Image (spheres, rainbow, N blue to C red):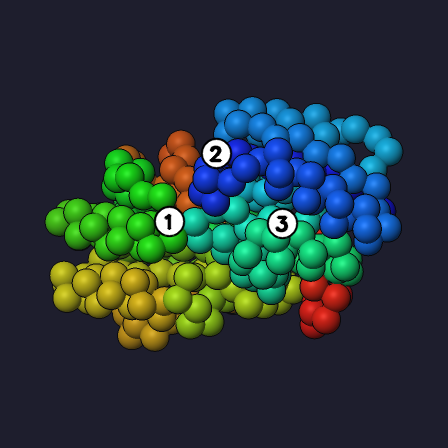
Amino acid sequence: MRLKGIFNRDGGTFKTTDMDAFSDLAANIFRDAGHEFECAVVGGREIADVIKKTVEAEGFDGMIVGGGDGSISLAAGSMYGTDKLLGVIPAGTMNLFARSLGLPLDIEEALKTLAGGKPARVDVPTMNGRPFIHQFSAGLHATMIRNREKLDYDSRFGKISASTRAWVDTLRTIPEISLGYECAEASGEGRFALVGVANNRIHGNASLFTDRPQGGMLAFYLLKAEEFDSVLGFALSYLAGRIEDSENVTVIETERLTLDFHSTGIDQSLDGDPIEEVRHAVLEQHPRSLPVIVPADSRLD
């Protein structure tokens, strides 16, 4: 295959990596496996433009993107709906999408796995037409993300620690979101502390990633704005990676969902980054709409 690599030197692992040496290693590994390969090392502020221009270019079959979940989300959003393959080098702190695809978390092992990997197609949802790979959230989780943005961390464990501290700050004021929702399976209105829509269900993974990237469904999570104890219980379940075990959480699986936020000033996030407030959201699942490279022995196809 003809592959182009884009490595975000500001990604977690890459901050302490000799990027010239890593680029040479990547080129050797892919070329030894029979691929054409060229790569560019860019900064975090440049990566969105570089990804966009690369996707629009002709004459290549896939893009190998190295960076954190933010970089991977950008790439997936740009490549969604195309015939270009996305390969993921997990150089961030959590690397949720790489975990979902079953890729090694060591960056050198990931290169070898991708060079000998196979194509597959995974699901990508959209929110008002905007692609995402993990989740859209409003309320508690989005507020935790905003609070976490104020803290410094350089590793996965640092991010987990920052999340714990951010939850403590978040729980001081529990949001109440007045929401109307409608899908084929259910509809209703109420006041909720958290609204979340994930790309397929999250089944007890401590890092909150789906292990069913071809499930073909949205997972809609609701937590009622009730007593502090129930919200605290959810926060503890979140930190333990077991949000579906919380008795106060409602989970609905659907292919298409409409949300109307009647409250204002509610924190919202998409793929772990804060976004401008959306009052009306249409979320749709697009099964197997993103071509990716997965390990040769993966069950994904």
Q: Would you name the residue on which mark 1 appears?
A: 155
Q: CA distance from mark 3 to mark 1?
A: 18 Å
**Which residue carries the number 2 mark?**
10
Q: Is residue 272 left or right of residue 57?
A: left
Of pointers 3 and 1, the one earlier in the residue sequence:
3
Q: Which three-letter amino acid code belongs to the residue tagged 2?
A: Asp
Residue at image position (21%, 62%) is 231
Q: Is residue 78 above or below residue 96?
A: above
Whether 213 is drawn above or below 15: the answer is below
Residue 140 visible to an observer of this rendering: no
Can see residue 296? yes
Q: Give x and y (percent) for residue 96.
A: 50, 55
Kind of element beneath mark 2:
loop
At label 1, the amino acid type is: Ser
- x, y percentage for residue 204? 42, 72
Q: Nearer the viewer, mark 2 or mark 3?
A: 2
How crowded pointer 2 is (Cα within 10 Å; few <14, some 14-19, many 20+) is rated as: some
Residue depicted at x 43% and y 61%: 208
Give the class, few, some or many, for how many residues have Cα within 10 Å of label 1's Cα (few <14, many ≥20): some
Q: Quadrant of residue 71?
A: top right
